[in-house]
Amino acid sequence: MSDVLLKAENLEVAFGGVKAADGVNLTLNKGEFVAIIGPNGSGKTTFLNLCTGYIRPVSGHVWLGDKEITRMAPRQIARRGIARAFQIPQLFTDHTVVENVMLAIASREGIWQALRPLDRREYRAEALELLELLNLRDHAETIAGTLPEGLRKLADVTVAMALRPQLLLLDEPTSGVSALERFPLMDTLMKAMKARGVTALFVEHDMEIVENYADRVVVWNAGTVMAEGAPAEVMKDPRVLENVVGVA
Ligand SMILES: Nc1ncnc2c1ncn2[C@@H]1O[C@H](COP(=O)(O)OP(=O)(O)OP(=O)(O)O)[C@@H](O)[C@H]1O
């Protein structure tokens, strides 16, 4: 069986005159934890949007496993196993944390219209188990909108994990989180992904996080992949230092 989970081939998309994807090729293997870095406006978020179906490419292809997902609707793609946690967490802020996770489980099970009681015992049990895994068990009954930023990010990931994704896309998981909290947050995320066999692709500006947590780093520049490899190797590339890290 192939180890390839996601394959993007020659993706192209433009907004006005700007080529946000200019022939993007990228392969993710099952179980990998891959970071995307690159200057502002280089097309990192556009790539995540292409993977989730929020943007359709002018040309090119995306496969998840052996199924082409290029022109599928976001909902279909989510059902096939790509979930996303946003830079700004997307929670129902006036509901408790456990209710948010239960809503995600219910949406996965497709019972929105089925008039079945949401507070089903097995949903709660599953939600609490996930919250335990993400170190949020003690905050299950907290109103999501009152959580501090680091915990809100973990809650957002818990909601995404409730969809049982094969691939989780994370948009700057540590942005807005204090320096002291960043490493524990990433430790928790890594533990959860590994425990559930989830592959992850995360956009990150913090090079320390990339070096410590990514198996592989992919460098974006002007709508294309400029370099990729092990973080320690890629960070030595003069083009990366000049264009991305800005220290050459
Ligand atoms: N919906 C859109 N409409 C118009 N232009 C867009 C749209 N989305 C992205 N762009 C443009 O495409 C280019 C790539 O944007 P994108 O957000 O993918 O970059 P990025 O690498 O994620 O940037 P950042 O690090 O600032 O988040 C930018 O020039 C941006 O202005």
Image (tube, helix red, strand yellow):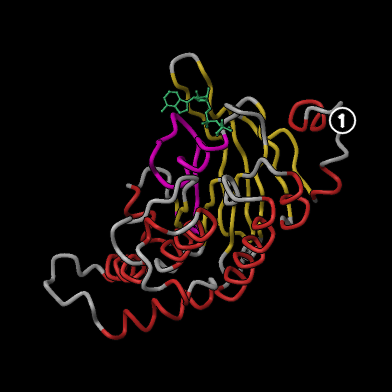
Q: Would you say residue 54 sits in the magenta stretch?
A: yes
- The answer to whether residue 127 is above or below residue 240 is below
- Can residue 65 be seen in this snapshot? no
Residue at x 52%, y 52% (from the top left corner):
169
Residue at x 47%, y 31% (from the top left corner):
59
- The answer to whether residue 1 is above or below residue 66 is below
Q: Would you say residue 36 sits in the magenta stretch?
A: no
Q: Position of residue 105 (x, y in %)?
A: 33, 70
Q: How many marks?
A: 1
Q: Position of residue 52 (x, y in %)?
A: 43, 47
- Can residue 147 be seen in this snapshot? yes
Specify the segment rendered in magenta: 44-67
Q: Which quarter shows the N terminus? A: bottom right
Between 200 and 135, the residue placed more toward the observer is 135
- Tell me the amino acid under the disc marked 1: Pro
Residue at x 64%, y 60% (from the top left corner):
186
How packed is label 1: few (under 14 Cα within 10 Å), some, or many (20 or more)? some
Element marked by disc 1: helix
Answer with left or right where residue 17 lies relative to residue 122.
Answer: right
- The answer to whether residue 79 is above or below residue 191 is above
Kindly identify which residue carries mark 1: 238
Answer with left or right where residue 74 lies relative to residue 43.
Answer: left
